[in-house]
Image (cartoon, rainbow, N blue to C red):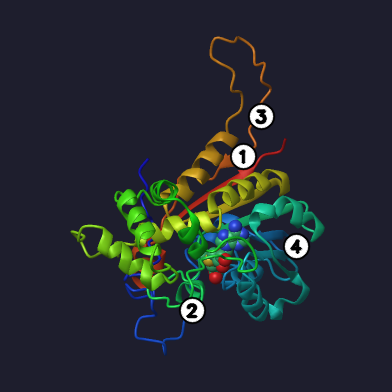
Amino acid sequence: MIVVSFEDPLDERTGGIAADGSPEGGAEVEVGHLPVMAGEVVETLAPRSGSLQIDATLGGAGHAERILEASSPDGRLLGLDADGAAIARSARRLARFGDRAVLRQVNFGQLAEVAPGAGFAAVDGLFMDLGLSSFQLVDVERGFGFRAGGRLDMRFDTSRGRSAADLLATMESRDLAALFRRYGEEPFAGRIARTIVETRSHTPVETAEQLAALVARAVPAPKSRRTHPATRVFQALRIAVNDELAALEAGLAASLVLLRPGGRLVVLSYHSLEDRIVKRFIAAEQRGCVCPPEVPICVCGRQPNLRSLGKSRTPSPAEVAANPRSRSARLRGAERIAA
Ligand SMILES: C[S@@+](CC[C@H](N)C(=O)[O-])C[C@H]1O[C@@H](n2cnc3c(N)ncnc32)[C@H](O)[C@@H]1O
């Protein structure tokens, strides 16, 4: 399996973030998160006044704000984020929309259970902007960036689950290696896992800074300096800590329950593991009968649930130049078909 990282959030070209994960130019740089492909997202979702929309990944609420503006004067939006800090930030940014914006701190893996209780049982749009925000990346306490000196956490929701430092302290060498291979396609997974286990026998591996240095020591010097040698390990740990791919599968499945006929699913992904799941989900749900060709009459009774809204889209060169963080984004959309 080839893992192509559409976006390396730790890359030196990532908007405002230096190769070591620190904000470019030092701590005085004001951190912001520019919504990626915002025009294309709104165009694909096509929110109308009076419609109900879900933004399952609020982050800094950049997309949510655009969606609420486009659905003025009375469209409503349910905004979710697993991260309490993202909810607090979004609440401030969206305050001017009053009760048109309903925010919940919850994992979108629980979307099907949460949305009906919030009054969003049948919606016109569901949007997901996967991964992490620039706010999380530059917060040294969260452990997402290479130079973070605090405990290596990496949880979107810091109130539950196991941190990356816990996994590094307790997992066996072969399990760590499997994790780095599976979620990062790290070619030196075994070597890195053994170095972690050897290091922790005398010194706990607890900070992002320590882990980045340890990986850099464990692997041969990179041929290109485009990405830090620990990029794949960091991606793999983050995916594992947040069980990101299982949450994505559950969130996509929820779209079939929540979208009205004609309602739209729009997803922005940033690496091939995510995009493959989205692509396959849409392809599977737009298929009707799956009976083998030798069966003369359909016996499976399967009906398509979605209609793809065409090929995936990527940001324009102008957007990539203005916001390098957008460069690995891939947008896919589909429309719910009446059952
Ligand atoms: C790329 S950012 C979203 C940025 C946002 N669209 C904006 O314009 O500011 C992704 C956000 O999704 C959140 N997130 C990631 N996985 C999640 C999940 N399974 N459930 C809920 N929130 C999640 C992260 O905490 C992060 O704040």
Q: To which residue does mark 1 refer? A: 306
Count of numbered labels shown in the rendering: 4
What residue is pinned by disc 3? 303
Which sits earlier in the primary sequence, circle 2 or circle 3? 2
First in sequence: mark 4 or mark 3?
4
Q: Earlier in the sequence, mark 2 or mark 4?
A: 2
* Relative to 327, residue 194 above or below: above
Displayed quadrant of residue 60 = bottom right
Residue beneath the point at 21% across and 57% down? 220
30 shown above or below 201: below
Secondary structure under tag 2 reads loop
User: On the rendering, which quadrant does ligand 1 occupy?
Assistant: bottom right
First of labels 1, 2 by sequence position: 2
Q: Report whether residue 115 is seen.
A: yes
- Of discs 2 and 3, which sits in the foreground? 2
Q: Residue furthest bottom?
A: 28
Task: Nearest to the eye among marks 4 and 3: give it.
Answer: 3
* Element type at mark 3: loop
209 or 248, which is in the foreground?
209
User: Which residue, given by chain and number where applicable, does mark 2 sit on?
Assistant: 32
Quadrant that contains the N terminus = top left
* Residue kind at label 3, given as amino acid type: Gln
Task: Please name whichever residue, 62 or 274, is drawn nearer the observer in this view of the structure.
Answer: 274
What kind of element bears circle 1? strand
Q: Residues within 10 Å of mark 3 (few under 14, many from 20)?
A: some
Mark 2: few, some, or many residues within 10 Å (few <14, many ≥20)? some
Pointers 1 and 2 in contact (C-beta within 8 Å):
no
Q: Position of residue 2 (x, y in %)?
A: 35, 43
Q: Position of residue 64 (x, y in %)?
A: 62, 68
